[in-house]
């Protein structure tokens, strides 16, 4: 075997399964009881980002400038502290949809706000324990997808007129799509072609649902919680205490690409002081920055963090590849 062959074999054996990132704290909360930072959603223009807290010490939604990281707006719960902002979604009209659950009940509601979180409208959606939310524009229609924390189903609403939102009965069966084998659904995102990606925390899965056929596939991920799409990949958080991570999968095949971690936070080694809760919802901007909720990282403390710019690299998992594929990879790297 030539020396060149030895190099190729050695290179092919490399399997990088963890990519560390440097992060910055956007906001850290400290209180007598955890605020439970959960939901994260970027505005469609990328200029601001929203984060929601669901427990007694807060139950509010904050808006941050994505450049300065300063908080520029905040609302102390929609209709008071009894509503938990479980999920947030935005559209290109500047609307912010906050999906609330009335604490202690299964009653949920959709609250629509302007970009500055001032009220627009609201609608009670009954006994649906909301888990996640996403808005897709299809032609001239704005469609709000809402996952359920119990029951393994997704509902879709037509929100063209935010003052008269309606259940879209053309979706699934009468407006509700059952996720086969699904249960405690949490965050979801929908690709431009209508393909749905939704995390199922208690069943340790992320589901991919074809937007045309409704064919369903899934990949296993311990306590899957947050989901985001970027560059042909699907990023999902593992809400798993000290073992929390972001796992990256191919958006089409769901094949594993790599795991992402938090290397440094604010220039220091990342430290998670407790094993409670974990990494919750995420969103990714066009610049590749990842915005993430680090829930209960220490006793009664939550923090909202953002990764370095251009954080999403080329696939880092290199399994045993053929010589031709390796040569192509080398050519790409030299360009």
Image (tube, grey):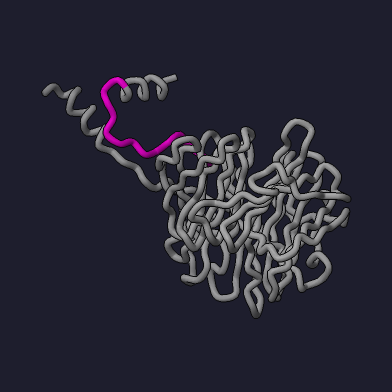
Q: Classify the position of the C terminus by image quarter.
A: top left
Left or right of 3 on screen, residue 279: right
| Residue 75 figure quarter | bottom right
Tell me: residue 20, above or below residue 103: above
Considering every residue shown, the one lying at the far bottom of the view is: 32
Dominant secondary structure of the residues highlighted in magenta in the image? loop
Relative image position of residue 224 (x, y in whole percent): 50, 56
- Residue 85 sits inside the magenta stretch: no
Considering every residue shown, the one lying at the far left of the view is: 1
Q: Residue at the spot x=63%, y=68% of the render?
A: 36
The number of discs equals: 0
Q: Residue at the spot x=67%, y=72% of the render?
A: 55
| Residue 296 figure quarter | bottom right
Left or right of 75 on screen, residue 333: left
Q: Residue at the spot x=76%, y=50% of the render?
A: 167
- Residue 321 sits inside the magenta stretch: yes
Relative image position of residue 111 (x, y in whole percent): 80, 57
Q: Residue at the spot x=63%, y=61% of the render?
A: 38
Q: Classify the position of the N terminus by image quarter.
A: top left
- Does residue 41 appear anywhere in the picture? no
Closest to the observer: 87 or 149? 149
Closest to the observer: 272 or 184? 184
Residue numbers of the magenta segment: 311-324
- Does residue 61 appear anywhere in the picture? yes
Relative image position of residue 245 (x, y in whole percent): 46, 55
Left or right of 58 on screen, residue 28: left
Tell me: residue 231, above or below residue 207: above
Closest to the observer: 321 or 201? 201
């Amino acid at each position: 075997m030539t020396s060149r062959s030895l190099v190729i074999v050695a290179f092919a054996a490399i399997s990088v399964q963890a990519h560390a990132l440097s992060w910055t704290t956007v906001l850290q909360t400290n209180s007598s009881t955890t605020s439970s930072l959960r939901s994260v959603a970027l505005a469609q223009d990328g200029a601001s980002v929203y984060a929601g807290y669901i427990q007694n010490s807060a139950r509010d939604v904050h808006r941050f400038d994505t450049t300065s990281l300063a908080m520029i707006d905040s609302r102390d719960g929609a209709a008071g502290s009894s509503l938990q902002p479980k999920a947030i979604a935005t559209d290109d009209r500047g609307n912010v949809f906050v999906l609330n659950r009335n604490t202690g009940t299964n009653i949920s509601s959709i609250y629509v706000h302007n970009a500055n979180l001032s009220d627009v409208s609201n609608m009670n959606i009954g006994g649906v324990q909301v888990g996640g939310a996403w808005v897709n524009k299809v032609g001239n229609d704005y469609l709000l997808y809402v996952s359920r924390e119990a029951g393994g189903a997704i509902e879709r609403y037509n929100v063209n007129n935010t003052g008269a939102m309606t259940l879209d009965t053309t979706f699934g069966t009468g407006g509700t799509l059952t996720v086969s084998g699904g249960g405690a659904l949490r965050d979801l995102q929908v690709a431009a072609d209508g393909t749905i990606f939704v995390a199922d925390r208690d069943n340790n899965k992320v589901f991919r649902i074809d937007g045309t056929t409704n064919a369903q596939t899934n990949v296993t991920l311990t306590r899957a919680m947050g989901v985001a799409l970027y560059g042909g990949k699907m990023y999902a958080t593992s809400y798993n205490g000290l073992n929390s991570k972001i796992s990256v999968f191919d958006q089409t095949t769901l094949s594993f690409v790599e795991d992402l971690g938090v290397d440094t936070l604010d220039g220091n080694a990342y430290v998670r002081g407790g094993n409670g809760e974990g990494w919750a919802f995420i969103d990714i901007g066009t610049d590749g920055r990842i915005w993430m909720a680090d829930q209960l990282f220490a006793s009664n403390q939550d923090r909202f963090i953002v990764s370095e710019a251009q954080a999403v690299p080329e696939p880092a998992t290199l399994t045993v590849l053929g010589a031709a594929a390796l040569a192509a990879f080398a050519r790409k790297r030299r360009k």
